[in-house]
Amino acid sequence: MSLKGLDDLKRKLQELQKVADELDGNIANLSFEPHDPQSIDLAIQRMEAAVDEKVGDYRDNNMVEDLVLAIKERYRQAIIDRAAEARSGKEG
């Protein structure tokens, strides 16, 4: 691996750390109607937009992109799970 390759890897890892720091904590405050599929979809879209906004200019980094995809999927599932819990009356 050339020195340039190492420099690129170092840059990508630094960017990944910056993005991880940005995504640690509250990303967005969302509300939705658990009985309304459109409301749930809109909440997912708002979450994804908030993640994209925090990621900013690092989308060309494949490590960042992998992290973003995983985080979006995790939060998408959390929204769906909360809606299901609310519909079943198990809301905490």
Image (spheres, rainbow, N blue to C red):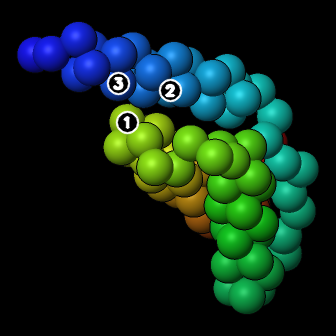
Who's the residue at 43% across and 41% down the image? 61
Q: Is there a contact, CB below 8 Å, between mark 3 and mark 2? A: no
- Residue 83 point in image, percent of width and height: 69, 65
One can see residue 34 in this view: no
The residue at which mark 3 appears reads as: 8
Count residues near mark 3 (Cα–Cα under 10 Å), then give few for <14, some for 14-19, many for 20+.
few
Which picture quadrant has residue 19? top right
Residue nearer the viewer, 44 or 48:
48
Q: Amino acid at mark 3?
A: Asp
Element type where label 3 sits in the image: helix
Q: Amino acid at mark 2?
A: Leu
Who's the residue at 67% across and 67% down the image? 44
Res. 63 mark: 1
- Residue 6 point in image, percent of width and height: 27, 14
- Residue 74 point in image, percent of width and height: 51, 47
Quarter of the figure that contains the C terminus: top right
Q: Is residue 92 left or right of residue 60?
A: right
Q: Is there a contact, CB below 8 Å, between mark 2 and mark 1? A: yes
Element type where label 1 sits in the image: helix
Q: What separation in Å lies between label 3 and label 2 (alpha carbons)?
A: 12 Å
Who's the residue at 36% across and 43% down the image? 62
